[in-house]
Image: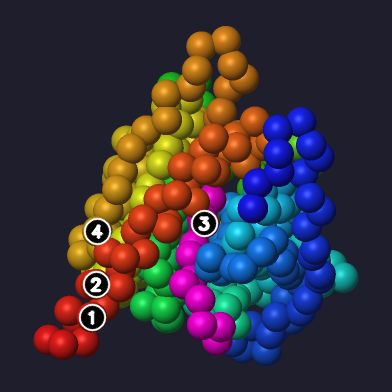
Amino acid sequence: MTAKPGSPEPDVRSRRITITARDGYALGATRFQALGPPRGNVLVAGGTGVPQRFYRRFAEYAARRGFNVLTVDYRGTGESSPASLKGFEMSYLDWSEKDLPAAVDLLSQEDLPLYWIGHSFGGHAIGMLPNHDRLTACYSFGSGAGWAGWMPRGEALKIRLFWNVLMPVIVRWKGYMAWSVLGMGDDLPKGVYRDWKRWCSYPHYYFDDPRMTFVHARYAAVQTPCAFVTSRDDPWAPPRSRDAFVKGYINAPLTIYDIEPAPGKPAIGHMGYFRSEAQPFWDEALEWLLQAAPVATAASCRSASG
């Protein structure tokens, strides 16, 4: 459903809900209701340290175009935070093994295609889901390997300073990853800091971590059509960083392309994929998901018959 030119966009109905993660942890989430007959369900898997409210513009936009949308705060973040992050124990893997799977469980109960929109970490999580087979198609923005060596030289220097000098001091001081002190994002539990720092020290993220050898088989099991899109001016996940990570999806039909920032327009960077001026990217993503659905259905039928 699209508003006539010059008319105000129709209001989207949304409601806050609580999702129970697979281990019983309560997660704050928001459901956005499609205008008109729903074309599918969309789960937004956000980036690390990015609260669900950041994706509200996209969620409302997609709802106006006929998609039910779910956004969620992972444990230890946003509306899913404890009273204090100090002493709060969790693993970074909890988000992809317990939190997001519960959202997939919820949406897959409905007789609609289930689409995935990922941002940064959201593109990583697909391969770690125990129920990724329920996804019809996935489209992710700005997902990379996290290694400073893939980044532009200036950004790489800042990231190395961040991980090796500034953040260890802040974590010892606060007891958690208080990167809001640096104006970089919402604060994160110490467990996320510990895992994230270690994996970002490897060129291919946790695929190179000797303690994470099991991830290769998990990613190899993914056969869902996936698109990984990156802006050439994304300092944290430039195209070569993206390429280093998505090699893990060895059996998934992959679509990979780069966004060329328009001259004279605001930089896209790592966060611009979901700012209001990014609507053309959203249209491309939603259209790609709809077109990928028949491919996913055909592949599922071939798998079942074989």
Q: Are marks 1 and 3 in contact (CB under 8 Å)?
A: no
- How packed mark 4 is, by other alpha carbons closer than 10 Å (few <14, some 14-19, many 20 or more), is some
Which residue, given by chain and number where applicable, does mark 1 sit on? 301
In the image, what residue occupies the spot 36% across and 64% down? 293
User: Residue 68 placed where, x, y %?
Assistant: 63, 66
Q: Amino acid at mark 3?
A: Ile
Whichever of callouts 2 and 4 sits on the residue coming sooner in the sequence is 4
Which residue, given by chain and number where applicable, does mark 2 sit on? 298
- How packed mark 1 is, by other alpha carbons closer than 10 Å (few <14, some 14-19, many 20 or more), is few
State which region is magenta: 109-122
Find residue 248 and report its image quarter. Answer: bottom left
Of residues 72 and 124, the one drawn nearer to the viewer in this rendering: 72
Which residue, given by chain and number where applicable, does mark 3 sit on? 117
Cα–Cα gap, marks 3 and 2? 21 Å
Secondary structure state at the residue bearing disc 1: helix
The numbered dot on residue 253 is 4
Whichever of callouts 1 and 3 sits on the residue coming sooner in the sequence is 3
Of residues 3 and 89, the one drawn nearer to the viewer in this rendering: 3
Is 121 in the magenta?
Answer: yes
Of residues 150 and 222, the one drawn nearer to the viewer in this rendering: 222
Q: Are marks 2 and 1 in contact (CB under 8 Å)?
A: yes
